[in-house]
Image (spheres, rainbow, N blue to C red):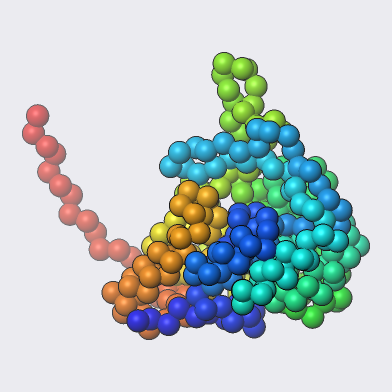
Amino acid sequence: MADLSVDLAGVRLRNPFLLASGIWGESGDSLGGAWKAGAGGVITKSIGRLPRPGYPNPTIESLERWGFLNAMGLPNPGIEEYPKEIETARATGATVIGSVFGADAAEFVDVAERMERTGVVALELNLSCPHTEGLGSEIGQDPAEVEAITRAVRERVRVPVIVKITPNTADPVGLARAAERGGAAAISAINTVRALAIDVHLRRPTLSHGLGGLSGPAIKPIGLACVWQIREALTIPIVGVGGVMTAEDALEYVMAGACAVEVGTAVAFEGIGVFGRLVESLGRLLDELGFESVRSAQGAAHGSEARAPMPARRRRPPRSR
């Protein structure tokens, strides 16, 4: 069977499937459960300096096969309380990455330093939540802010810093470049896409906050495009995020240039058992396609053979009526 282990900026993952931040990460037990189910690593929910209750319900709407629309408002218990959950998760042997957010560089640094002390193997900076005022993509759309926050955190921690960028921008590569200049060890691309749904009977948005973030299969082409563009421009590792439901989805991201992928909506639809299915399916798929490892497939779609013109397709005769 193909080797599924990968190296993410010096962090060894047993397979490329990471539990995405904000999914199943409320407690140490749930994080540990995802690890036991086969995840290659788990990312905590995004944690801030102080507790946040999040937005009132309704905060999430299923869009059937397309994914989810959500506006949670970054609910979390705060960095003072959450470390005990990481301790519980780490007790299972899980490879834990800590996700943090803040309103400015000083707040990011404070939370990142305390998160590092919990024993996480890396930090993911949430600079991309699309629906929280004064946080996330509101500061993460500015390359200067991205660079400054990344540099401030990188100078104060020893673990690798992964920057999660927003797709809600005209220039995702510019944001990735800014993160790299600030010292990021890797890029996560992408977070949810800003979106809206309206209840025509109530004549108002379906979510209490109004605007939300779209996740799931509907955004996979956007995530793939961002990973592709970043791989063309940068050399640091990329984590692909958005609509990974099958092994084929994951391999698309890998061939676009990602070394690992985050899985979120699939977990919400199927539960943590999805990790076992994905791991087994990806191993078979790599074998079928002649790849010895995930690493050997990484960036395969950027090769000269991939860019060669496709053979002209024979035009089919029109159907008789």
Q: Determine if residue 229 is in view.
A: no
Residue 313 appears in which quarter of the rendering?
bottom left
Q: Residue at x 76, y 52 (%)?
A: 76
Q: As drawn, which residue projects farthest toward the right?
A: 106
**Which quadrant is the C terminus positioned in?**
top left
Q: As drawn, which residue projects farthest toward the left?
A: 320
Q: Is residue 248 left or right of residue 68?
A: left
The image position of residue 230, as x and y in percent, is 59, 66
**Would you place residue 54 above or below residue 98 in this image?**
above
Relative depth, front residue between 36 and 149:
36
**Which quadrant is the N terminus positioned in?**
bottom left
The image position of residue 217, as x and y in percent, is 47, 49
Relative depth, front residue between 40 and 102:
40
The image position of residue 78, as x and y in percent, is 82, 56
**Would you place residue 274 above or below residue 315 in this image?**
below
Q: Residue at x 56, y 19 (%)?
A: 200
**Would you place residue 267 above or below residue 83 in this image?**
above
Relative depth, front residue between 119 and 203:
119
Q: Is residue 138 left or right of residue 58?
A: right
The total of numbered circles placed on residues is: 0
**Would you place residue 259 above or below residue 229 in this image?**
below
Q: Determine if residue 134 is in view.
A: yes
The image position of residue 98, as x and y in percent, is 72, 67
Residue 155 appears in which quarter of the rendering?
bottom right
Residue 110 appears in which quarter of the rendering?
bottom right
Q: Residue at x 73, y 71 (%)?
A: 87
Q: Residue at x 43, y 42 (%)?
A: 65
